[in-house]
Image (spheres, grey):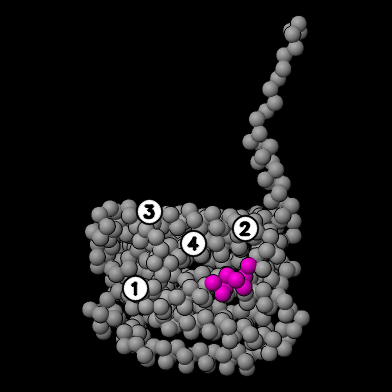
Amino acid sequence: MRSMSEAVRRTLERPLASYQLVLGTSALLLGIGLVMVLSASSIFALVNYGSSFSIVIRQLIFAVIGVTGAVIASRMPLPLMRRLIRPALLVSVALIGATFIPGVGITVNGNRNWLPLFGGFQLQPSEFAKLALVLWIADLYARRQKYLGTPRYVLTPMVPVAGSVAMLVVLQHDLGTAVVIFAVIVGMLWIAGLPRRHMGGILAVLFVGLVVAVANSPHRVARMLNFTNPQADPDSAGFQAIHGMMALARGGFWGVGLGGSRQKWGSLPEAHTDFILAVIGEELGLLGTLVVLALFIVLGFAGIRIAMRTRDPFVRYGAAGITIWLLIQAVINIGMVLGMLPVIGIPLPLISYGGSSLLVTLVSLGVLLNFATTEPGAKRALAAGRTSRKRAAAPAPARVRVAGRR
């Protein structure tokens, strides 16, 4: 046991430890996600689109675009990234506003948060706003690092701007995304050192706002009231939660095998999106579910480690914000599937089907990889690794035989 802990300690002392943790866990989660989207969506895709592969092909297209964006983000100079943050936030807010234009915005499941693209694809601007908002807050706090001991500099203009973005999302009737944004706001305020009494006031306002948002929707009220006892309304508000737990129960420890889910045959709504973890639990069992949870824990550890080890305040706040966002979203999704939280429609990062969510998540992880290179010795080790790979790939010089010699 001591030798194992010593090996782990030595591994974490390497300059690229955080970089490799983020890269490895992201790749594994993406791979699991693509396989499970294929499995969970195969029946739905066959019935609705005529091919079992149509949905996973769409997801794969966004994965390729997202990985490309992640590579670009991981190598982008931080000064350039900081210059692009404000325009990116303005564009994402403008796109959210465009969803309210009649004939432009698309309503899906009661949420008016989509814009049409070519080839039948759709774009969800609020996903892009999450990343832009996190980086904008990080840039703001980095510029005000010396003044964050004063609550006024912590709260303004961060809370008005971020709160306005979140309220636009609420007006789209997308309560799930709004909850994630509000959670990121609270997390960033806490990291910036906002005093407890101010934090208490923020939390009180958010709680009242959440109650009002829920009270204005009978469907949300029903889900809030029934999430602790979904059997009270098994045919409506509790239907999805019940079938999600049935899938988990059927899977047991080892699962019924990849592709063997029964719930994905139409019993479980959103089997390949918000409730894909239930299909993972049914097909891969508790073991597969725990693997997914462990990967998110490792990813969260790596993100926190990057934030704690860097000397750059922008990197510190940015890494912390991205980590809070991804972990909060994962925790809420997992809580929904386990029946511990109300169902509010939040995808599981890198796992659930959803092009906009996958693309933005991959780019955000590329940004996190960029941040990881600011750790002591990381850039030097990364450059050395690239140089050695180039030398290994280069052809060996040909031997020239001199005439007349043997």
Distance, label 2 to label 3, CA atoms, is: 25 Å
**Which SS class for mark 1?**
strand
**Label 4, label 1: how far apart the Cα atoms are:** 19 Å
Image coordinates of residue 203 in percent, x first then y, are 54, 89
Distance from the alpha carbon under mark 1 to that under mark 3: 21 Å
Checking the image for residue 359, the label placed there is 4
Q: Earlier in the sequence, mark 1 or mark 3?
A: 3
Amino acid residing under circle 1: Val
Answer above or below: position of 36 versus 213.
above
Badge 1 crowding class, 10 Å Cα cut-off, few under 14, some 14 to 19, many 20 or more, is few
- The residue at which mark 1 appears reads as 108
Q: CA distance from mark 3 to mark 4?
A: 14 Å
Quarter of the image where one finds residue 217? bottom left
Residue bounds of the magenta highlight: 84-91
The residue under the point 76% across, 81% down is: 146
Label of residue 57 in the image: 3
Nearest the eye: 123 or 276: 123
Q: Secondary structure at mark 4?
A: helix
> Residue 358 appears at what percent x and percent y?
47, 62
Quadrant of the drawing holding the C terminus: top right
What residue do we see at 52% from left, 61% from top? 362
Q: Which circle's residue, 3 or 4, is located before the other in the chain?
A: 3
Q: Amino acid at mark 2?
A: Ser
